[in-house]
Image: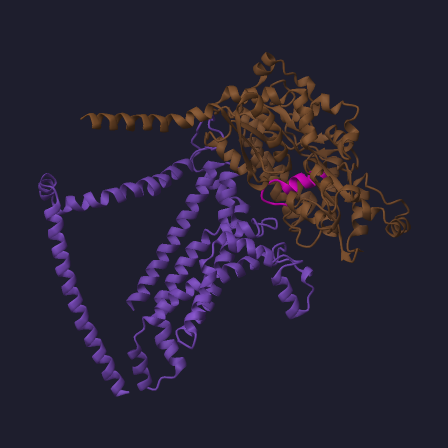
Chain colours: A purple, B brown
Amino acid sequence: MTARIRKRTGQFFRMRRFKTQVKSVTDTSSTILGEAVARATPAPIASRIRGLSDRSMAWLFITPAIALLLAVNIFPLIWAIYLSFTNFRANRPNAALESVGFSNYSRVLNDPNIWQAMQTTAHFVFWTILLQTLIGFSLAYLIDRKFRGHAFWTTIILVPMMLSPAVVGNFWRFLYQPQIGLFNHIVSFLTGIPPSSFEMLGSVRLSPWAIIIVDTWMWTPYVMLICLAGLRSIPDYIYEAAEVDRASLWRQFWSITLPMALPFIMLAVLFRGIENFKMFDMVTLLTGGGPGSTTEVASITLKREAFESWRTGRASAFAIILFVAVFGLANIYVKALNKVKQR
Amino acid sequence: MKTIKQALLGATSAFVLFVAAPNLAKADELTLCWAAWDPANALVELSKDFTSQSGTTMKFEFVPWPNFADRILNELNSGGKLCDLLIGDSQWLGGSAENGYYVKLNDFFDKEGIKMSDFADAAVNAYATWPKGTPNYWALPAMGDANAWFYRKDWFAQPEIQAEFKKKYNRDLAAPTTWDELIQVAEFFNGREIDGKKVYGAAIFTERASEGITMGATSALYPYGFKYENTPGKYDMEGAVNSPEAVAGLEAYKKLYKCCTPPGYTDAYMGESLDAFKSGQVAMAMNWFAFFPGLYKDEKVGGDKIGFFVNPKEKVAASTLGGQGISVVANTDNMDGALAYIKWFAQPDVQKKWWSLGGYAVHKTVLNDPTFTESQPFAADFLVAMNQVQDFWQEPSYAILLQAMQKRLHDYVVADKGTAKEALDGLVKDWTEVFKDDGKL
């Protein structure tokens, strides 16, 4: 054991020396390149730039990015906030635009359909995150063992994540088809229930789970990748020290693996949470929000309000409410994440 | 210097050509927008005559039905210039007229001698006028259509099936004429094994996203006595929309859905209905007349194997209206060309050819022709249906009204939520809110 630790320490110092050498070479190259660029800059421009302060130069570089951000993000947001206080309908260009105060917000918050959509969204987000985290972390833990053929299996596991949601939605529709779908036939083979006797997408009871299964199938590899990065960031010497202290594997998992991978797991939960809160494409392709409104998540309600009913003012109010909810929750979560990282 | 001048001249010429070329091409070109379905192919064929006569190239933008309203209404609302001519749904008339998306055609019709009295009255009212019942024309009736039924005539004719039906119901097995009979026949066929295959009673519309379940359920609601208003134009819906007759109609539709549709039939519209029938899964199916020529020609289930019948009556005879009028989009850059197309399309000879190619012409020259009812096996039913059609609201707020009905009906019929009375009471509440917002109540 002592020999292994010595070997590791030797590797560490060798790596440090190598990094120092690389940095020195990079610094030298940057200086040479900088001088070459300075020489190539035409004299009038060079003299004009030379007169600028560092602060001005910084503004000069970030202004295009800020202008773009204002145009595509901030302006539409402000415009949506403005519209949310009006009776505007995009399909009535000639109608007079009137201020309606907080009426749109009040109607959205008192609409039972909206609350039902929020509940459906919460159910979907909760179960997909729970399942994806559990399965994703378990897979990452297995892959991290580096068994024979692990690279091949990693690639296979990652395939669903690389597909387009439109493709996934369409082929799962076929898989769930009660008469010819593979899913129903597998369930039938395993349980003896006739394949046509249940409908994954048409049943009020099963359709929310049908969507959860597809999302979990597609996005668990993503959670796995992040968790794998977390697991691989844990230095081996910690485990070695734990082995010296004769800590059991279970103890190592609870005291080393999980706490050290936790920031990564939390990051994966954050990404998937935000993504699934605004889930639209897959649900639309699988059920279109049906049967009835059983799987109508908030984003589908919002789309129907904005682009089918054309109540643009009310849809804007709903969008702002969703934005505030996601933004607020994400902020609280990020603070918790930072605390975990600082531990 | 000379070289620079030549280069500049060349570049300028190229730029002018580049800018002007699309506009030059546009003058001889028209884009017609419609849904992507069988009659659209017939229209492409028909329009070749217009191109050969006028020299105008016809371009077509056909959008699949589930996205048709979304795509085209977005185009109109955003002031797009994609379509010069639009064959739009009848429900869009109110909004498109009031928002100035369509050109009012009265003066043009007067100038060119196009008479609306030459077209079927129901079609003119449904596809061309806004406000309803007034002589303000925003479209030329282009394609008559209604929801109707087709069935496996060969199955109905099998002696053992006939005998069993007679024994069970004490009447001959034939195409249903009432909704009670329809449900009875569907129940009779459902789960039966024919030609070694399990079959189902009927394929009906249950689609949630666009208009499917509304178009299907109204085919039961109208015959049972559903009305939109107690007094037309008053928006007094209480007791009309949720009348006991309407409740009975909705219950009948749900009964048919629950007893006799194939498994997984929870979100089905035109395509699914055709697939179910063509694959030999169902004894009967509902769909628009527009598909009937194609069905009749189908090698597997067409010809002698298929029969057609008009939507069964119950208390009254009624059919759900389909079909569209052709309008000139106000935003077009080629107004003269678009109007020339309308003028050409309105000619009796063109209308006759339109019917022969598979389009449902509603010009009286076609409909009153003594040979019309014999021209196709479904032609007589088409005439009957067009005389009993009822349409959904054509109000500018039709989209909100339709979404509300889609939700209420799907919740009740497919998702088993509440009762028929509760669904229709909820619908009255939703629609009342919309008309209050519009200042009509």
- Say if A181 sits above or below B386 in the image: below
Q: Is there any visible trace of residue B119 in the rendered image?
A: yes
Number of marks: 0
Give me the residue at 41% from left, 52% from top. Answer: A326
Frontmost residue, A325 versus A291: A291
Give me the residue at 40% from left, 47% from top. Answer: A323
Q: Which residues are magenta?
A: B207-220
- Say if B78 sits above or below A297 in the image: above
- Say if A254 sits above or below A170 in the image: below
Magenta stretch: helix, strand or loop mostly: helix
Quarter of the image containing the C terminus of chain B?
Answer: top right
Residue A9's x, y, as percent?
22, 80
Residue A159's x, y, as percent?
46, 62
Frontmost residue, B284 versus A240: B284
Frontmost residue, B295 versus A237: B295
Give me the residue at 11% from left, 41% from top. Answer: A42
The answer to whether residue B219 is magenta is yes
Q: Quadrant of residue B199?
A: bottom right
Frontmost residue, A332 versus B210: B210
Q: Is there any visible trace of residue B220 in the rendered image?
A: no
Q: Residue furthest front?
A: B2
Residue B380's x, y, as percent?
78, 31
Position of B366 compared to A150: left or right?
Answer: right
Residue B439's x, y, as percent?
55, 27
Quarter of the image containing the N terminus of chain B?
Answer: top left
Q: Quadrant of residue A342?
A: bottom left
The answer to whether residue A234 is magenta is no
